[in-house]
Amino acid sequence: MIKSNVTNNVSSLILGVIYSFTISLYINPNNNNRMLIPLFFIIPLTLFFSKIINELPNKFNNLNKKNKILIPIFSFMACILYKIIFISYKNYLLSYPTIIKYSINIFMFLLLFISFSILFISLLQFEIPVKHEHISKKRILIYAVPFILLGIFYLLAFYPGVMTADSMNQWWQISEGVYYDSNPVVHTLFTYLITKVWYSPAAVVIVQVLIMSIMIGYCMYNFERLGVDKKILYLITLVMALNPVNGIMFITLWKDIIYSGFILLFTMLIINIVITNNEWIYNRKNLIYFILCSLGVVLFRHNGLVPLFGTLIMLILVNIKKSKPYIITFVSVLTIFLLIKGPIYSLIGIEPASSSEAFGIPTQQIAAVIKNNGYLNEEQLKKATEIMPLSSWSENYMPGNVDYIKFHKDFKVDSLMDDKVGFLKLWAGACIQNPKIAFDSYLSQTAIGWSVKGYVNGGSRGILENSLGLKQTVLINSLTKLCNKFLDLTQKPDLQHFFWKPAFQMFFILLFGLLAILRNGSKTLLVILPVLLNAATIFIATPAQDFRYLYSNTLVYLIPIVFCFIKIDSVKHDISIVPKATSKK
């Protein structure tokens, strides 16, 4: 026993020394003190490895067979995700010999792998048994109040709200009574109905704040019903309500805000479905709620089709014998969606959105090839010139943002739309002939979805200059200064990725999604599927690095963190969470 302890201690010390120098060389490759810095790491790392060597084998052996296989796989996946999302591709170790570079990278990867394995094993020791408590719906309001106050606080600071070009476009449609579907008309009409009561952006902000607050309040209330400690929920509420990002988003007139709220609510409803093994949705009232929420997802942003129908298809596939409510939802939502987009739009004279928005990534890749003097044959150059002069392609290419091209006076969108096949042939040829340029351009254009590096457009704090008489007024100067200080703090280089880089939140959504699978099986993946599919649309078509496209990540990421601790197996088929109407089943 003594010999074993000595061996463990010696091994821990050796690993502590090796990793102290590894970490120092990795984070400070060119620092003059890189041989002195390891002295600060040796003791804590030695203790870390001593604890691992003494405790990890026993904890691992106590796992069930499935998790003994899955934890190494998931830890490896977490390492890859961490490297993709957080680690710059710039090689800081160029000055070292090849063997040193490879050794450092391998040692760091192993350290990450061990750390994620310990994290998964440790967190599996904690769980929340489902209780299905009956509590007053007034609790929704209690959880909603901090967010209502947050909205009022920021509205008073930036009265009557924040409006960008998209907001102004919708306001112009309302003022002129001419509607078109570049921004979802359902959201424009929603705004119009509010302005019939009070013709001010502040009216829209107030309604938006109330809706978002109630949605978040419902999520916290629902977790409390499921048995999550109120102290944890109050802490989550506090974290979300003190986030300046939520403050400025709540008062910005964008369809993306309420759409993100619907993604959050949809996620919570799926938690009800998963925890009750489909019993929740067999109640007629709950099914209606689910359909209405689904309509919110699909009608408030054009890309809502992907997360909504993708999730419904998966719900049908994994619940074949209990798929009736999901088929009803799918058919109902699709029918309503087609009726609105077809006969109703035609009846009231609404012009459909241009499909040119879908060509953002191909446009960027073509521009990148031209900018970087890639190879294009004569026919391809001719086709590119028909759409835009080659000099303009080159001069206006901005990695990550197609707006500089698509809104340029020389960009002939009609030429593109009149010959979509020809444009796609040009794009395919440009990518095949110049794969590296095209791939680098794709990575730049989709960076908001997979990396915390680079630029992200957080939006605005004011009202775009306009001819509609809309201006921002400073009601309380000290309050405006205070809010600006909070927002400026979130945009500091060292803090920005916590608040404004959606890939940061996505890492935790995926990480704790994996933990939920370890605890309760693969069906729990359904919970994070809507937000994953919403993020996937970035990789299909995104015009710019706009935070608002993935604002749902900020709203949702704390939900899977709480959910992953709930032990579904502890449910003894108690369906008291479901109203009595389910007893007919």
Image (cartoon, helix red, strand yellow):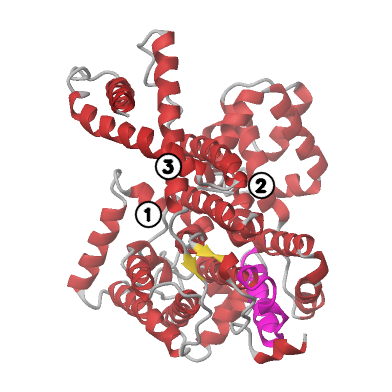
- The crowding category of the residue bearing disc 1, from other C-alpha atoms within 10 Å (few below 14, some 14 to 19, many at least 20), is many
The three-letter code of the residue at mark 1 reads Phe
Q: Tell me the residue at 76%/49% (across/down).
A: 417
Q: Residue at x 27, y 55 (%)?
A: 488
Q: What range of the chain is rendered magenta?
A: 274-302
| Residues at marks 3 and 2, CA–CA distance in whole angstroms | 35 Å
Q: Is residue 129 visible?
A: yes
Quadrant containing the C terminus in the rendered view: bottom right
Name the residue located 82 percent from the left edge and 77 percent from the top edge.
343
Amino acid type at image mark 2: Ile
Q: In the rendered view, would you say 154 is above or below 545? A: below
149 over 113 or under it: above or below: below
Q: Examine the structure image and report whether residue 533 is included in the region drawn in magenta.
A: no
Mark 2 and mark 3 in contact (Cβ < 8 Å)? no
Marking on residue 499: 1
Nearest to the eye among marks 2 and 1: give it. 1
Q: Disc 3 designates what residue?
A: 118
Q: Residue 77: image x %, image y %? A: 55, 38
Q: Earlier in the sequence, mark 2 or mark 1?
A: 1
